[in-house]
Image (tube, rainbow, N blue to C red):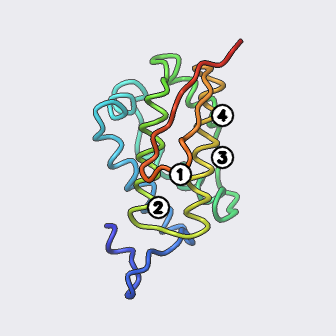
Amino acid sequence: MADAQRTPTGVRPDLTSRKHIHDLVVGFYRELIMDEVLGQIFEEVAEVDWSKHIPLLIDYWCRVLLGHQTYQGAILVAHRHVHDQQAFTADHFDRWYSFWVATIDQTWAGPLAEKAKSHAAKVGGSLARQLPRIAWEPTQGATCPIARGVPVNG
């Protein structure tokens, strides 16, 4: 799939269309569910209905990256439900973010691709602070980001 997105000159395109975002989301979750740690959370704990989840996520990222107003969801509520069943850890956020960045970097490049990575880092940090109450952020400058988790005081 990665090579199919490249232009004739071999340059990676940016995430400028709903189709690009569809391909990113589908590719990301295709890899994520195969992960020995995260796959179990999505398949056994959250019991994700992919026919509903994927379109919702495509709408979410189209809102973030393209300004489309079709997303109707509540990120914290959905993740709180899963966290209540199996507590999220810094390793979960590290793995999730590493998969996200690797999926983007494999196929896309440009300002919107960078925005997708930085926004995901903000979302991960926010969820980490609100659910397991840890301070989490990706390590800056890593080619394949390895994040760190630090307990939050209070």
Q: Earlier in the sequence, mark 1 or mark 4?
A: 4
Q: Are marks 1 and 2 in contact (CB under 8 Å)?
A: no
Identify the residue position indicated by label 3 in the image. 72
Write down the residue under mark 2: 22
Q: Residues within 10 Å of mark 4 (few under 14, many from 20)?
A: some
Amino acid type indicated by mark 3? Gln
Q: Tell me the residue that label 4 is attached to.
A: 126
Quarter occupied by residue 122: top right
Q: CA distance from mark 4 to mark 2?
A: 24 Å
Residue type, mark 1 in image: Gly
How far is the residue under mark 2 from the one under mark 3?
A: 17 Å
Q: CA distance from mark 1 to mark 2?
A: 27 Å
Question: What is the distance, in whole Å, between disc 1 and disc 4 at their CAs?
Answer: 20 Å
Label 4 or label 2, whichever comes before in sequence order? 2
Q: Earlier in the sequence, mark 1 or mark 3?
A: 3
Q: CA distance from mark 1 to mark 3?
A: 33 Å
Q: Point out which mark residue 141 bears.
A: 1
Decide which of tag 4 and tag 3 comes sooner along the chain: 3
In contact (CB < 8 Å): disc 2 and disc 3: no
**Mark 3 residue element:** loop
Element carrying mark 4: helix
> Which x, y percent locates residue 11?
43, 79
